[in-house]
Amino acid sequence: KSCLKTYQRTIVTSENIKFGLLTQKDEFEHSLIDFYAPFLEFTQDAILRKIILGKYRLALGQGILFAPKLGISKSGATTTLPMKNFKSLKPYTSSYEIWFMNGFATQLSWESFSLIPFYSNAKFSANLANDKITSFNESGLHLDDLEKNNVSEKIFGSSFCFEKDVGEISLNFAKINFDHQFEDSAYFANYSAVSLDFLFHRKELSIFGEIANSAEKFGGIMGIKFGEDKF
């Protein structure tokens, strides 16, 4: 074990290609590199807009199914619009060691249509009892290597969006599978999730929301904004 705590993040950009690598180690962990997050991103102004290989994150709709776990992205619209404001697909550049996606995702765009198919096979650290998941280790501290990355999560799905000047509407689908059952029967190891999100605006009126069904649970959010005043 080492008392050293290390962190480094490197991003190299060349025209429409970006490569990144983040490594991190907490105090008293065995490995010299306890966590690493590499990615390779290709972007262009064509039908095939973006490809990401490695670790990435999705942020769709109002964030019921997929949202950044550490808060939403900020922009000049943050104080003027109540809607969540973030890019749908981005490389994962955080040292937070859980709930990232690992695999590949692409973004295709043609006229008013866009499609984001994605696949992820990620390993997380969980607390197990009788080989069932009781909770996840969100601290990122791994003093016992046997409890490190001991649960696998596979996700595949897609997001289909239609956008016009008056707004946009998206249909999102994902299939999620954990390789361990949960001790709490309220949680499923294998389930599907689907959501519909929308945003319509005309003059000073904006209507936005998302409805979702996941693991036999239903949820939704909806809002209306009048005027151009800031919050």
Image: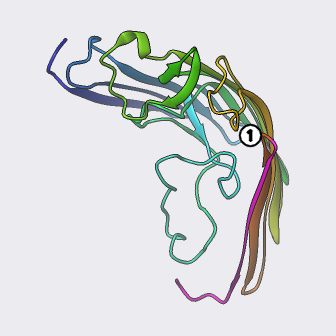
- In the rendered structure, does residue 219 fall within the stretch colored magenta? yes
As shown in the figure, which amino acid type bears the numbered disc 1?
A: Ala
Q: Tell me the crowding category of disc 1: few under 14, some 14 to 19, or many 20 or more residues within 10 angstroms, Cα based.
A: few
Image point 82% across, 43% down: which residue?
Answer: 216
- Return the residue nearer the eye: 131 or 177: 131
Image point 66% across, 17% down: which residue?
Answer: 179
- Return the residue nearer the eye: 179 or 106: 179
- In the rendered structure, does residue 221 fall within the stretch colored magenta? yes
Residue 228: which quarter of the image? bottom right
| Left or right of residue 142, residue 102 in this image | right
Q: Which residue is mark 1?
A: 46
- Return the residue nearer the eye: 59 or 137: 137
Quarter of the image with the N terminus in it: top left
- Return the residue nearer the eye: 175 or 111: 175
Image point 50% across, 35% down: which residue?
Answer: 92
| Left or right of residue 132, residue 37 in this image | left
- Asked which colour scheme the image uses, the reply is rainbow
Residue 56 lies, with reference to residue 227, above or below; the image says above
Counting from the top left corner in percent of width and height, residue 88 is at 65, 47
Counting from the top left corner in percent of width and height, residue 184 is at 64, 33
Q: Which residues are magenta?
A: 216-231
Q: Give the SS element for disc 1.
A: loop
Magenta-colored segment: predominant secondary structure: strand
Counting from the top left corner in percent of width and height, residue 60 is at 68, 50
